[in-house]
Image (cartoon, grey):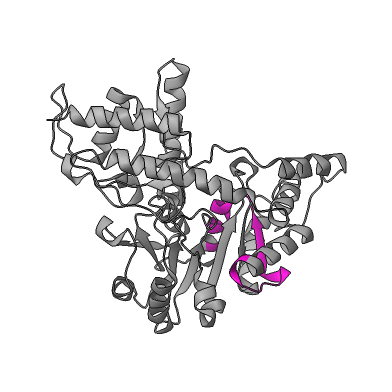
Amino acid sequence: MSAAFGPSLALNRIQPSATLAMTSRVLELKAKGVDVIGLSAGEPDFDTPDFVKEAAIEAIRNGQTKYTNVDGTAELKAAIAAKFKRDNGLDYAPAQISVNVGGKHTLFNALVATVNPGDEVIIPAPYWVSYPDIVNFAGGTPVIVKASAAQNYKISAEQLEAAITPRTKWLLLNSPSNPTGGAYTEAELNALGEVLRRHPHVWVMADDMYEHIVYDGFTFTTIAQVCPDLYERVLTVNGCSKAYSMTGWRIGFAGGPAWLIKAMAKLQSQSTSNPCSIAQAAATAALNGDQSFLVERNAAFKSRRDLVISMLNQVNGMHCPTPEGAFYVYPDVSGLIGKTTPDGKVITNDAALIDYFLDSAQVAAVHGGAFGLEPAFRISYATSEVILTEACTRIQRACGDLR
C-alpha cells in the first residue's frame, strides 16, 4: 500500500467489533479441534419459527425476488405500524417507518444522517459495543455515562442531567440492555423524561431490540410511550433478530419523525438500497403472526438466566446482578483483579481474565472493557442448560485456581 493511499480518517476512528472478534477466535479454535464453549455471541439458539420460514419460501415461489422500496415494502411497513400500535401504543404512518438491514444498520443510518462534528451523543455504559464507534464514524463525540452494578447498570436522572451540554444531540437508550440485561421501569423512564423536557435540543434513540425478552413479570415500556410529549424527539428502534431468532435475516426497523425517516432513506439509497426482499416477506409474517411462541422461549431463557446467576455468584470475587431481560449477564469481577494464575500471570484487568478463561477453561466470553465498564465480562446464555452448566463449572474451577 502506498503512503498516499490507505484507510480514510473516518475508518480510522473506529475499531472492529469486540464481540465478533471473539466469535472468530472461537471458530478458529473449534476448527483446530479445541473443546471451546463460546458464550460471546448475542444470538438465540432457537431456530426461526416455521411459519416465518414458510412465508419466505412462499415469497420465493411467488417471485418476490426484485427490488423493493428502498426503506421497506408497504406490507412490511404496515406490519411494523401494527406492531408499534399493538405492543407500544404508538402511532406511526408509513412515512414514519424505516426498514433496514438489521438493527445496527438502523442505528448507523440515523446517526450518520444527523450527527455533525462537535455533536455529542450520550451513551450509558455498559453499552453495546457498536454505539460509540458509529458515533465516532459520524464525526460526533461519544459522552459515556457509567452506571455500576450497584445501580443495576442503569443511569439516573441526575447523571443524565449532568451529562447534557449545549452540544448534546442524542441520548442512546437501550432497554433491555446488551450487555447487562438491565431494563428501565416506567418510573425510571419518566424520571429521564423529566430531564429531557428541560433540554428540548436533545433527541432520544430508544433501542428496544430485546423488548420481548423480559422476566419475572417485568412490564416493558419505551420512552415515547411513557412520555408522549417527547414523541417528536424519539426514534424508536427495533427489529426481528432477537425475539424471532432472525439474526441472519438482517431486518431492523424504526419509527420516528417523517423528516428523519426520509433522511435515513436518502443515505440508504446510496449504500445498501433495499433490505433483502425475501427477508422482508419473512419479517412481515413474523410481526403479523401468532406471538405465543415467545412465552415458551422466555421461560427457557429465564431458567438459563437463573442457572448462570446462581453458579457465577458462587465464585469468590464475582458479583452477578439479576437482569430484567435480554439473554446476557454482566458479572462484576473486581474481586478477581490482582490475583495470580497457576502459571504465575497476574490478572491485571478483565481482558486478562477473559484470556485466562479461554486458555485454561476453554470458555469464551467478552471482557467488560469492550462495553465501557470494567472490571466485568459478558456472558450470553442463549444456549442449552447442559452447555451453560459445563461452562460455569469450568469458570468456577478456573477462578478457584487463582491465588
Closer to the camera in the image, 280 or 219: 219
Closer to the camera in the image, 253 or 192: 192
- Is 220 rendered above or below residue 228? above
Q: Residue at x 73, y 57 (%)?
A: 288
- Is 137 rendered above or below residue 385? below
Q: Magenta stretch?
A: 87-110
Position of the C terminus by quadrant: top left
Q: Quadrant of residue 117?
A: bottom left
Furthest residue toward top? 33
The answer, for residue 15, to whether it is visible in the render is no
Indicate whether residue 123 is drawn in magenta: no
Q: Residue at x 45, y 79 (%)?
A: 201
Describe residue 233's horizontal placement relative to residue 351 as left or right: right
Describe residue 403's horizontal placement relative to residue 382 as left or right: left
Indicate whether residue 93 is drawn in magenta: yes
Q: Position of residue 32 (x, y in %)?
A: 44, 15
Q: Position of residue 43 (x, y in %)?
A: 52, 41
**In this figure, what is the number of numbered marks?**
0
Describe residue 235's horizontal placement relative to residue 402 as left or right: right
Closer to the camera in the image, 148 or 316: 316
Q: Position of residue 65 (x, y in %)?
A: 81, 43
Q: Position of residue 71 (x, y in %)?
A: 70, 58
Closer to the camera in the image, 284 or 269: 284
